[in-house]
Image (cartoon, rainbow, N blue to C red):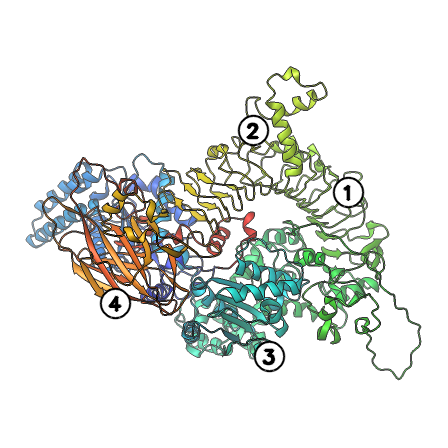
Amino acid sequence: MGFRFDLMEDEASILNEFADEFRLPIYQRPTENVDLDHVEQASLDTQLPSSNVGFRLLQKMGWKGKGLGKNEQGIDTRLNFTNYLYEALVNENITTFLDEQEVETGEELKPELTIAIKGSCASIIVLSKNYASSTWCLDELVLILEQRKVSKHIVVPIFYHVEPTHVRKQESSFGEALFKHRQRMEAEQDEEKKSQAARKLESWTEALKEVADLKGKDVNGRIEKEFIEEIVKEISRKLDIHMKSKIPHLIGRDRFLYTIRSWLHGGSSDTTEILTIWGMAGIGKTSLAKHMYLLYHHEFERSSFVEDIERRGQQSSALLLLQNKLLGDILKKRMIEEDDVQNCTSKIETALLQKRTFVVLDGVDNFEQVHVLVGREGFHPGSRIIITTKDGSITDKALLHVKYPPKHTKLALDRLHSTDSLKLFCQHAFGGYSPKEGYEEDAIRASKYCEGHPLALKVLGSFLLNEDADTWSHTFTMLESREFQTNHVHKVLRIGFDSLPSVCKELFKHIACFFVGKESEVTEEILKDSIKYTSHGIKKLVERCLLTIGVEEELKMHQLLQDLGRDIVRQESLDKPWKRSRVWNHEESLNILQEDKGTKKIHGLFFDMKMLKKESLCGSSSAIDHEFQDNDLNMNFGAAPSFSRPLEFSSSRCRKIEFSTKGTKKIHGLFFDMKMLKKESLCGSSSAIDHEFQDNDLNMNFGAAPSFSRPLEFSSSRCRKIEFSTKVLNKMEKLILLQLNHVKLNGPFKNFPKGLRGLCMHGFQSEYIPSDLPMEHLVALDMSFSDLKQLWRKPKFLGSLKYLNLSYSKLVTIGGFKELPALERLILTRCESLTHVCESIGECGSLVVLNFSYCSKLKNLPITLSKLKHVTVITLDGCSAGVFKNEMKRMKLLNVPNKDRVSKKAQPFFSSITRLVPTSQKSISLSLPSSLVTLSLTENNLSSESFPVDFSSMSMLKNLYLDCNPIDSIPDCLKTLSRLEVLSVGGCSMLKSILCPPSTIKRLYAEECDLLEKITLHQDMSAPPLICCDHSVSLTDIEGILKIQDLAQVDNEIICSLGWTDIQYVKDYEVEIYNLSVRAEEMKKLRVKMLCEFGIFTTCFPGKEVPKWFAHRSNGRSISFTMPSASANKRIEGMNICFVHTNSRDFLLSYISTEVKNITKGHSWIYYCYMGATGFAGEDLVWLSHWMFWNNELEAGDEVSVTMITEEVDGGAMVSECGMSPVYSDRDKGSVDPLSYYKSWKYIIGGDLSAFEFPSGNYYLTNYQICPNAYDFKRDFYSETRFKKSFDDIHLGA
């Protein structure tokens, strides 16, 4: 069975170009989920014994291809192995196609199969017992191995219940099959055919020998399904399918990419530069900026991408939220809780002056946003700032107030040229770059109409995908009509909407008005009754490029499309919002509620008192306001709001203004603003809030609330209050979605619409939910920040309620769960008065998610939790004062030697808990369900000795978060978790070692563990996990992966074995070392270190030249030579390589990226050292490395070249000299090898480097893919996990 991956040449060249510029292999690149537009075809062919199963590799983000053929005779693997393989490929997002055509023995290879093999990058050959019986399989094997020689084709043999020696020597079934082929050859009467068969037989024999000698995979003794998953993962990694799918190729933007690349690297490293990318909405500004950021942010000390400022700035306190994100990225802090805009700006200014930073401010629409986000003090030399905006003058205005204005460059992003427009259109309309036959003129006509606008091209192309000629003709008629006097882009977007089925149209409007940013699942459930086939409708909107789904399953919509949807709703009644189907503007909602203008037309209405900033006549700015952010303004049915502390409202004295009714007919307009009466100081002293109003408040904003950077605080006693009678809702009988935040409601709640499915009432003022509130159809209820002390006085049956969020409420007890049979998520974050959860929660058979975070007074968890069979996520962060404190008491009781000595008062308590665990156990089970997949115990003051959890019953647990606990080692109970994939111990400041977590671990998060020194991984791991250890400054040893130690502490026998002669004098030198694995905050002068990874030993010390003992030296950054012969008693053990970095100025980051090529054997190793050093002018650095080549990788007579990949480092450090020297060993075979420990490592040269092979025989040796930075770790983690507990605080910065 042979897998064949086809990658078009133009794509390969782009990827190679990226690799050259990154100085890192492709799979390291930080990227995001974006279409890989430039790939046309990628096919995967498999060959079974006497059968060929063809696979088409169709990456879900944009791979296209043609299927290949298969034959039905391969019964020995087809019924099991192939089925598992097929399933694994599909699960890896590789769409698989099977050609069911029969193949006769002796039949020649199909031409399409030959073409596919020659155009592919890799093959997996499954050698089973009947493999050699198929002449077709043998012919393909010969062709695949030929491709390996001429095109570096990756070949991975799998020995499927056969011995490699049987394949090599043609024994057993392989010998029998070849004997039959030989018999047929000898029986052939035609001499020409006989001669041809003899040549084939010889080539088959040689091919079987060759494939048996390759490093293959043996399925014997393995569970086939696990084995296949491992193979698919390895192939995906080798070909970098996952990461390539995220590289954002931008059609028609090469000129701009070149311009920005030149701008990034062309300026002086002593100056700061700002680039403004400006252009109309939807033109691709964000895509272009994000593309460049993802490619180059790793070249800077700090980086941050602040996205969608314009839209997010329309929401309360958004700029403070963005400030905290930016400051966190620059400081590399997991949590930033600044609560004052001015203070935060000041801290950002200080941070930007200290580090060379790359910042992108995306979607700026006001120059003051620039001042708030990056300040006015300037930047560290070498920093680069990109601003994207629709207004090209914004940056100029902002720089007028900057103390030291940097150099400013503008880049106007224009529309695509006709050729590129056609390409982009065809990509979405036909799945390729060219029009389908017969549609050439129509495609050109359509692309021209879009006038080069990328978003319009995508929407129109997606609409016309697979449509017939009549639809195309009708579309052109609508586009070219004069019915709408709007621009072409708007027409195209409107056509995309008009073409939708009526159900999808309603869904589009609902999402545009209310659900952008909301979770897809929750949206579907709320709208399910009012809109049929909601799930299918969302898929249809995605297919039409009218909607996208984010990595957190949130609904995302381009601003132009959201504006279109809202405008369509607005057109229902321009002047009378109560006659529209949806009302999202808070001022319009207020008018409807105050004037009692509600109608049965309204399906959804949002009103939030906090958004009515202009209505506030008093109150100074408070830190508390910033805590509300977007979480308080939006519905949070499915997740807890992420506030750092509970909220309070201050009460401040405000003078009230009253008016008489005097006025005249002459007055046509009148402006009065309470805030402008500053001399009178009506609300006390002037505060920072006064300045927030500025021009926004002076202009008329009838249609939308002004976009202030922070909300205004409302007085609880003296300021104007908003009160409504519940009768105003009586007329809105078709209302399904209602938000009434921070208002007082008077009257009976029976007036609420009967069909409500989503209800959000933050700040609800009653102590319980009114019994007369119609809730029969309610699916989602959010009553966060309320005065609720209990759910209700008398339980009420709610058969539809699935999502209940009562976060930050005053709950004391909660029960009545028997009446909530459909409940799936219960969110009780920071209910700090909650003491008791009723045992009736065990009746909620549908419960999936439970969040008790920071319910600090909660005494214990219900025992009945363990009965629940569907709960997959439980969050118990910050419960140390309650639940865990009581569990500690239980533990002490359980450890009482004699139960009889327990006081009578304690006997009932003791009896109730002994049901949980045997009395002999030292840990207590928290009665958690066995179905748990994710458990978070962050910030619970848990120590290793008294870890109060028994995990033995949690066989399904995959994700465990123990962050910010004082554990000093990993609790032993974790070893019982046979399915654990994610372990997070970030911020565990006492943690000293991580010893053998379960072998199933795929992600290990250990950031900011100050005392962590060593990580020891399980020896049975098939592949190393991703490890994030940023700022764990003491970490020097990840066993089997990397080890850093003082050179002075390295045993002299090891130094001698490395062939490092006369370097004793450098041991006491000091160098500013930068460990890329931990990315410490500051570089420090330390004694000379030695790093070992991949069997490569590296050190760095001050010096001017290559040491004299090097046999081969050369000026510049490369050297070539022929490996000399060794004497009879010696053998090649390795090679020493040396480079001298000359520094032209201070503070230059020096590191090595080395390529070693064995030209004779066609192998190469590119090594990216995970240690850097700071160079200073006049103090050059010598980099010395020993490469272990002890397994015949280098032999006498081999032509070898060594090259430092990058000549200039950071614009100033250059390679002045290099050298190499072979290392031989005359050690007796029976003697102890000083390097035996390092040779026992798995991932070393001469060991198993399959995870780093790309393509066959070529290796990219970098631990970046094992120890990525927090940015990449978070991105990869998000793409694989639904619930991302502790990772929410990892900022998207380098």
Please determine whether, in this image, residue 794 is positioned above or below residue 533.
Answer: above
Rendering quarter of residue 867:
top right
Q: Amino acid at mark 4?
A: Gly
Q: CA distance from mark 3 to mark 4?
A: 46 Å
Q: Pick whichever of labels 3 and 2 is earlier in the sequence.
A: 3
- Residue 788 point in image, percent of width and height: 77, 45
Determine which residue is flagged by label 2. 923
Q: Pick whichever of labels 3 and 4 is earlier in the sequence.
A: 3
Q: Amino acid at mark 1?
A: Lys
Name the side, left or right, on which 473 lies relative to 1051: right
**Label 4 packing within 10 angstroms: few (<14), some (14-19), many (20+):** some
Q: CA distance from mark 4 to mark 2?
A: 63 Å
Q: CA distance from mark 1 to mark 2?
A: 33 Å
Mark closer to the observer (4, 2): 4
Q: Pick whichever of labels 4 and 2 is earlier in the sequence.
A: 2
Query: CB of mark 1 within 8 Å of CB of mark 2?
Result: no
- Residue 474 point in image, percent of width and height: 54, 73
Determine which residue is flagged by label 1. 789
Q: CA distance from mark 3 to mark 1?
A: 54 Å
What number is the disc on residue 400?
A: 3
Of residue 1060 and residue 1124, the one placed in the foreground of this image is 1060
Name the side, left or right, on which 608 lies relative to 451: right
Label 1 residue SS: loop
What number is the disc on residue 1116?
A: 4
Q: Pick whichever of labels 1 and 4 is earlier in the sequence.
A: 1
Q: Amino acid at mark 2?
A: Ser
Mark closer to the observer (3, 2): 3
